[in-house]
Structure formats: structure tokens, C-alpha cells
């Protein structure tokens, strides 16, 4: 088991977030229940309801967590709670009137993208002179650079996903439904330590040409190419890997050709990872390999996304993202080619940036897997 995050860990994150907000020209942050709240103070309400919960951060003021009184005992148990002033309110009170004194009536705040509209509107009504902006837009890199403990968790999650892939190669595919193989993948992720399975894409034959195909009742046949994309959370941090397999050893020439192209694009992009290279440049490098091979119009998504306490988060490896890579960033590299009505191929690893280059958290073979 990894070392639990401590109050000191959360105190440092709170201080860094507050300083980053000031640097971004904000008075502070208002953080709703969700990934950012978990990251900053270790608290996740048992249920996210219409009752206001909000972490308020601003320079020169102690971090404050506004909670419904009936949920205060749970909030007090959070590892980051000792670093916070807890401010509670009870049913019948106006939670926005309780929160307003914590905010500058003329300030400008970043607010969580997942905050409920009713809460933002309530705060706007209580503080009509206060300005608001999206937290992700203002601080897109808030959780992007991982600490040592986070990297260890991501590496362990990647290793567990690798073990699940090795296990699925031993399972029969032909004659079974996609949903059957997806259930096997889910069980393997749990077996190897995941507490939560977020997705198990099993795209067989023509369904593989849909990058986010939801496993269905299609019966997998000999000769099918199958895209397997799966992941979830282990010890609070994400896994996400994709490999492409073929049912039977008689692989059509074009399937092998496309797989080789995607494999080369993935490897070339990985080799380009180093501090200072922009996110969009990694996307361009992967895309150039596939385009030069004549399949550019069939690479229909970004090259990658960040990963941490959620399986999709900044940074994004996509054209227009000029954020330079920084040691500690973690993201997927997952080029693909999707031929409508025929088959798809994708290869995905989670990668972190080091001073020397890239380090993979997925290390299963990139060759086209052969299954029965």
C-alpha cells in the first residue's frame, strides 16, 4: 500500500494553489466537490447534493471549507481538514450568505467547472460585484505536475493494467460477445488492485473503428481485429491503456500494415517527450507519421490526455495546446487509425516526463496481440 497523503501534503497543495491563483491574476479560488477538492484537501462528500459545499482559497486568508452542518463530521475526518477553517451552515440558512464573508466582494475568482449552476448563481446574487472564471481555464495545470507519491501510484496503476492485459490474452475471444470480454477485463482490473473501473472498450471488427465504442452484443469472430482500451482507479490514481489484438494468427496484410504505422507513430511521439517540448508538438509528431503513411484522415482524435486522480485531465496533447512539457506531467500517448466499417487500431501508454525524456507506466508489448 502507498503512503497515505498527510495534512502536510495537503497544506503544501493548498498554498501552491493559492499562489498560482494570485499569479494568474485571481483573488482566489472556489472549489466544488470533485477531483480538485479531493486533490487539495482529501475530502469527498459521501453524496454530492444540492447542499452547498465549497473550498475557498485566497491570499492572506486561511483556507476555509464551507460544509452543511450534517456533513461536518465527515469533513473533519479528511486528512487535509486540520489545514482548513471549517464553516458550517444548517438547513434553513442561506448558504451563500454564510459563504459571502469569505470572499472579496470586488474580487475575481476561479470556480470549479463542475460547480452547480445554482451555486454559482447564488454566489453571484450574494456578491454582484464579484467576477468569476473557469478554474480549468485559469489554472489548467493545477494538478498536472505530479509529486513523487503520485508518480508511484500512477506507476502501480499502470502495472496493474498491464497485468490485466496479460490476463486477457489468455481468455478466449471467438464466439463470445464484446460484453463478455469487457466483463473479463473489469474483473482482471479489480483482481489486480483497482477499486474502480472507469471503462472497458472492446471494439471488435467494424466496431473498432469507433474510438469510444461501448462494448455491445456483437459476437467476436475469427479474423476480427479487436481494440481493447481499459482503465480505472487504483489507490486513487488512474490507469488507461490500449492494445489491439487479432483473433487468430492469420493476420490480413492491411491490418498488419496499419498496426505497424500506429506503432511507429506511438514510438516516435514517445521518443520526442522531453521538458520544454510543447503538448501540440507531440500531437504533430504522431500525426505526421500517420499522415505520411496515407492514413491521416483516419486519425480522428487528439494524441493524448493527462491523467491523475481522474483518467482524463489536463494537459491535452492536441493542436493549439502550447503548454510546454514539465517533469512530473503524466499523459497518454495514443495514436490510432479507424477505417469505417472495417477495423481500428490504437496503441496507448501512460507516460511521464523526466529530466531525461519520457518514462512509460505501461510496458506490455506493442506488437499486435494474437488471441484465440
Image: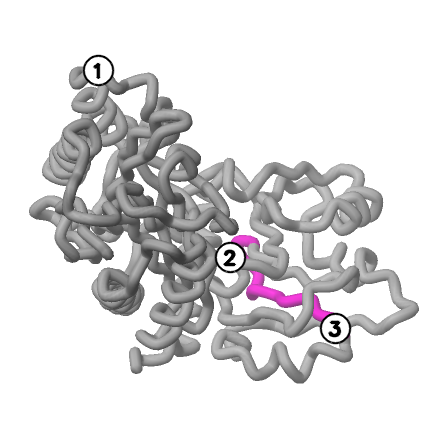
The image quarter in which residue 226 lies: top left
229 left or right, relative to 274: right
Indicate the position of residue 292 as horizontal and vertical percent values: 17, 16
Image quadrant holding the N terminus, namely: bottom left
Residue at horizontal 29 percent and vertical 45 percent from the top: 332
Question: Which one is in front in this view, the residue at disc 1 or the one at disc 3?
Answer: 1
Location of residue 310 in the rendering, given as x and y in whole percent from the top left corner:
44, 56
* 256, 195: nearer the viewer: 256
**How far, Cα to Cα, is label 1 from label 3?**
60 Å
Please state the horizontal and vertical placement of residue 273, each as a whole percent of the image: 16, 39
- As drawn, the label of residue 88 is 3
Residue situated in front as seen by the camera: 249 or 319: 249
From the viewer's perspective, is 33 left or right of 9? right
Q: Residue at x 51, y 57 (%)?
A: 36
Q: Is residue 66 magenta?
A: yes
Residue identifier under label 1: 294
The label number, if any, that marks residue 36 in the structure image:
2
* Identity of the residue furthest to the right in this view: 92
Task: Specify start and end residues of the magenta stretch as a single range.
Answer: 58-68
1 or 3: tag closer to the N-terminus: 3
Amino acid at each position: 500500500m502507498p503512503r497515505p497523503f498527510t495534512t502536510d501534503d495537503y497544506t503544501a497543495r493548498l498554498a501552491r494553489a493559492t499562489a498560482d491563483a494570485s499569479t494568474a491574476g485571481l483573488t482566489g479560488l472556489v472549489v466544488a466537490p470533485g477531483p480538485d477538492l479531493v486533490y487539495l484537501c482529501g475530502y469527498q462528500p459521501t453524496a454530492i447534493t444540492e447542499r452547498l459545499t465549497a473550498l475557498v482559497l485566497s491570499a492572506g486568508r486561511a483556507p476555509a471549507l464551507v460544509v452543511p452542518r450534517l456533513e461536518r463530521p465527515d469533513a473533519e475526518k479528511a486528512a487535509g481538514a486540520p489545514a482548513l477553517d471549517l464553516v458550517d451552515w444548517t438547513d434553513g440558512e442561506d448558504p451563500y450568505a454564510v459563504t459571502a464573508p469569505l470572499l472579496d466582494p470586488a474580487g475575481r475568482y476561479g470556480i470549479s467547472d463542475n460547480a452547480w449552476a445554482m451555486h454559482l448563481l447564488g454566489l453571484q446574487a450574494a456578491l454582484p460585484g464579484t467576477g468569476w472564471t473557469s478554474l480549468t481555464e485559469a489554472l489548467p495545470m493545477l494538478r498536472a505536475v505530479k509529486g513523487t507519491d503520485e508518480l508511484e501510484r500512477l506507476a502501480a496503476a499502470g502495472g496493474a493494467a498491464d497485468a490485466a492485459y496479460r490476463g486477457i490474452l489468455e481468455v478466449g475471444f471467438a464466439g463470445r460477445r464484446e460484453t463478455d470480454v469487457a466483463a473479463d477485463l473489469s474483473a482482471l482490473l479489480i483482481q489486480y488492485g483497482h477499486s474502480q473501473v472507469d471503462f472497458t472498450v472492446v471494439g471488435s471488427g467494424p466496431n473498432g473503428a469507433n474510438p469510444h465504442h461501448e462494448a455491445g452484443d456483437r459476437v467476436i469472430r475469427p479474423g476480427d481485429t479487436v481494440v481493447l482500451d481499459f482503465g480505472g482507479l487504483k489507490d486513487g490514481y488512474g490507469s488507461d491503456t490500449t492494445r489491439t489484438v487479432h483473433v487468430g494468427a492469420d493476420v490480413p496484410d492491411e491490418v498488419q500494415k496499419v498496426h505497424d504505422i500506429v506503432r511507429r507513430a506511438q514510438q516516435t511521439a514517445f521518443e520526442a517527450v522531453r521538458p520544454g517540448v510543447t503538448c501540440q508538438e507531440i500531437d504533430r509528431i504522431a500525426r505526421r507519421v500517420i499522415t505520411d503513411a496515407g492514413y491521416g484522415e483516419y486519425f480522428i482524435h487528439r494524441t493524448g490526455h493527462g491523467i491523475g486522480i481522474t483518467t482524463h485531465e489536463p494537459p491535452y496533447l492536441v493542436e493549439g495546446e502550447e503548454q510546454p512539457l514539465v517533469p512530473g506531467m503524466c499523459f497518454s500517448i495514443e495514436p490510432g487509425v479507424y477505417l469505417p466499417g472495417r477495423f481500428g487500431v490504437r496503441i496507448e501508454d501512460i507516460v511521464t516526463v523526466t529530466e531525461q525524456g519520457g518514462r512509460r507506466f505501461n510496458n506490455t508489448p506493442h506488437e499486435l496481440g494474437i488471441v484465440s
